[in-house]
Amino acid sequence: MPEDTEAVWKMPEIPYTMRKLQAADIPLFAKIVGKIGIDELISCYGDEDFTDMLVKLKNRRQKLSEGDTEAGGEKKASDDQFILGAAVVTRIANKVMMNMDRCMQEVFRLVGNLAGITDEEVGQLDLDVFAAMIVRIIMENNVGNFIRAASALLK
């Protein structure tokens, strides 16, 4: 791949309206977390190599678009927060996908509940759409914040 070309996954359009997690989803969400293991999810905050890679990518883009920063460094702070958030979301999504053998039916049921489709329909989704739905659930429901709070309680 040429050096000036970056391979970035473009999230596909999700053909369903997805609601946010609600209190009624807690038992199913807790089963998923339990089957994956809270320690597995807490480890999503410790992979510095991945975060460093995202910082380097941001710095490279910033060099290509010099003069794009706001006064007072506000954009840099928001970029850094975005990078940290993106790294955590990516790690959590990866943990869910890597542990699907432990919790596939629960994940299918949760995704289906949030999208208004059946577990069977979730199982038939294209892989990129399914992955996008997992990422959206993690991002829009602050799952990373939940896991960070849970990790603080375990210390």
Image: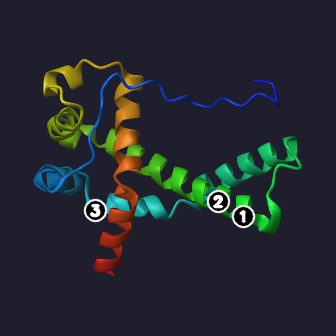
Residue density around tag 3, few if under 14, some if 14–19, many if 20 or more, within 10 Å? some
Q: Residue at x 29, y 20 (%)?
A: 125
Q: Residue at x 25, y 58 (%)?
A: 37
Mark seen at residue 38 = 3
Q: Give the residue pinned by disc 2.
A: 78
Q: Nearer the viewer, mark 1 or mark 3?
A: 1
Q: Position of residue 17 (x, y in %)?
A: 30, 31
Give the quadrant of the C terminus.
Answer: bottom left
- Is any atom of residue 98 visible in this view? no
In the displayed structure image, the side of residue 69 where residue 44 appears, left or right: left
Label 1 secondary element: helix
Q: Residue at x 44, y 58 (%)?
A: 44
Q: Nearer the viewer, residue 121 or 91?
A: 121
- Is any atom of residue 150 visible in this view? yes
Q: Amino acid at mark 2?
A: Ser
Instruction: Note whether 129 is above or below 80 in the view shown.
Output: above
Label 3 secondary element: helix
Label 2 secondary element: helix
Q: How is the image coloured?
A: rainbow
Q: Position of residue 32 (x, y in %)?
A: 20, 50
Q: Amino acid at mark 1?
A: Glu
Q: Position of residue 146 (x, y in %)?
A: 32, 64
Residue density around tag 2, few if under 14, some if 14–19, many if 20 or more, within 10 Å? few
- Residue furthest front as drawn: 71
Q: Are marks 2 and 1 in contact (CB under 8 Å)?
A: yes
Q: Nearer the viewer, mark 2 or mark 3?
A: 2
Q: Amino acid at mark 3?
A: Ile
Q: Earlier in the sequence, mark 1 or mark 3?
A: 3
Q: Earlier in the sequence, mark 2 or mark 3?
A: 3
Q: Give the residue pinned by disc 1.
A: 74
Could you give the CA–CA distance between mark 2 and mark 1, rounded to whole angstroms? 6 Å
